[in-house]
Amino acid sequence: PIYSSNKNSTPLYAQGNTHWSDYGLSTALVELLSSMDENSINKYEKVGVKLANNEVLERLSFISLDTYEDDYSVISTADFSKERILLIRDSFFENRNGGSELKVLFDYDEIHWSYIEKISPEIFNLIIDSYSIIIVESSIESLLYYNLNEKPRLEILSNLFPNESNWY
């Protein structure tokens, strides 16, 4: 997990957890919305406190802690009502980690990486042809590096997208 080096700043990741804190999620959502619609105004604001997500800590060390973190709300002027959006996801945008907050900002269909890694380029292209925006969510480790006997996800994507496509 990555933690902020400045002790006075809010960490992007929850302490003792590999999942994003609400502050980190809100920051990521504002960046995502701003890249999807450059003319929109996107911001987050603190709205209170909430129980922190400590699932990983509980699962790995059998310690249940009731800790609280700042609760943020994302506000956006972006309008994606005419867009078809596909989210290729790992686990970050599951409801417990922010998926429910993302659904409030815009509607999307989703496909899990475990499906993408098994299909042919032809099937993949049939799927993506009906979408105007595709969001790829993955851990940096899985995206860039080999994991066991699997190829990095960036390599998998480069083999699935048509050669003439411009993606970044």
Image (spheres, rainbow, N blue to C red):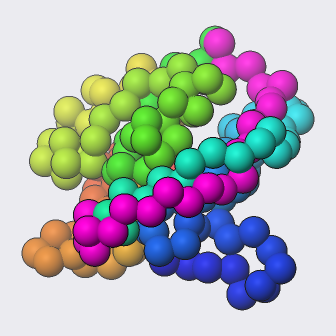
Q: Nearer the viewer, residue 129 or 2?
A: 2
Q: Is residue 34 visible?
A: no
Q: Nearer the viewer, residue 69 or 99?
A: 69
The C terminus, quarter of image: bottom right
Which region of the structure is painted magenta? 59-81
Q: Is residue 28 left or right of residue 75?
A: left
Spot occupied by residue 138 in the image (x, y as percentages of width and height) = 41, 58
Q: Is residue 53 left or right of residue 119?
A: right
Q: Is residue 4 visible?
A: yes
Image quarter for residue 106? Answer: top right
Spot occupied by residue 120 in the image (x, y as percentages of width and height) = 16, 43
Q: Which residue is drawn at the image coordinates 65% and 26% (left, top)?
A: 105
Image quarter for residue 125? Answer: top left
Q: Which residue is drawn at the image coordinates 23% and 45% (left, top)?
A: 116
Residue 22 is inside the magenta segment: no
Q: Which residue is drawn at the image coordinates 47% and 46% (left, top)?
A: 97
Spot occupied by residue 80 in the image (x, y as percentages of width and height) = 67, 20
Residue 62 is inside the magenta segment: yes
Image quarter for residue 5? Answer: bottom right
- Which residue in the rendered view is the most extreme toward the top? 82
Spot occupied by residue 81 in the image (x, y as percentages of width and height) = 65, 12
Label count reads: 0
- Compared with 24, 80 (above or below) is above
